Image (cartoon, grey):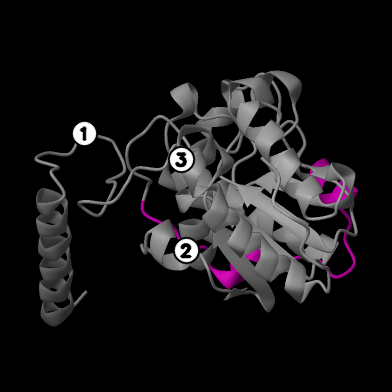
Amino acid sequence: MGVDGGRETIASLRRYLEELKESGVDELPRAAVPRGGKPGSQPEAASPAAAPAPPTPVAESQMATTSGETLDDIRRDLGDCVRCQLGNQRTNLVFGVGNPRARLVFIGEAPGREEDLKGEPFVGEAGQLLTKIIQAMGFARNDVYICNVLKCRPPGNRNPHHDEIVQCAPFMLRQVKAIGPEVVVALGTFAAQTLLATKEPISALRGRFHDYHGIPLMPTFHPAFLVRYPERKREVWEDMKQVMGLLGKGAPAIKG
């Protein structure tokens, strides 16, 4: 790295640290991935941690998939995965469930405790709410496909670390490509920021479609956030009505 490049790196790091300080972060723990947040924003309850890890873009070459591969192919490739430390701590690997040719895919952050125990994504209280949202959209749960960025539960439901994302996100993209959906819904801050490679808060990302490898992607609040803040359900429903419109489905009255 040249002198100019070194100065640019130092300047970027200094700006990042200043942003953290403005957000109320006075120090960073050793051996931890720095986490950023925006002051004054309402926390989302996708996990107990207060702020999501910064998004980690994954190179296109890392995420390239074999033409014509199936979800079964990808699951076999994952195997008894121990590509990161989470593989040695999980109860079950949570791959994903639903229609392998679904028109609509929902992607969350990572499995929680109940998901880790059952090996299925979104089966706890937040999962029950997601099922109600899916049904209100005119689908059955097995009509769509549901998965997470990570396939193993982070300890204490903490935010994913950089190495965990690097190892797991390519499999998530391969799942999406194998399914070939018409729309993807990113559930919560972390999933939206990771898929879109941005630090923008979910409140700024939701409400409009973004491009995800040629597929329209709608970010919206995580169901766990809605459990804590049910008054925000109306905003999620507005997002889902846009998804339904893109899929050519009418919008029934909101439930619950």
* Gap between marks 1 and 3 measured at Cα: 16 Å
Q: Where does the N terminus fall, quadrant-wise?
A: bottom left
Of labels 1 and 2, earlier in sequence is: 1
Of labels 1 and 3, earlier in sequence is: 1
Residue 2, x across and y down, in percent: 17, 78
Residue 176, x across and y down, in percent: 74, 60
Camera-side residue of 150 and 201: 201
Horizontal side of residue 16 vs 149, given as left or right = left
| Rendered image: mark on residue 30 | 1
* Quadrant hosting residue 161: top left
Q: Residues within 10 Å of mark 2 (few under 14, many from 20)?
A: some
Q: Are marks 1 and 2 in contact (CB under 8 Å)?
A: no
| Rendered image: mark on residue 211 | none
Question: Of the residues tagged 1 and 2, which is closer to the observer?
Answer: 2
Secondary structure at badge 3 equals loop
* Gap between marks 2 and 3 measured at Cα: 13 Å
Q: In the displayed image of the protein, which residue is found farthest to the front?
A: 253
Chain part drawn in magenta:
54-76
Horizontal side of residue 183 vs 140, given as left or right = left
* Residue at image mark 2: 57
Residue 204, x across and y down, in percent: 40, 66
Of labels 2 and 3, earlier in sequence is: 2
* Residue at image mark 3: 160
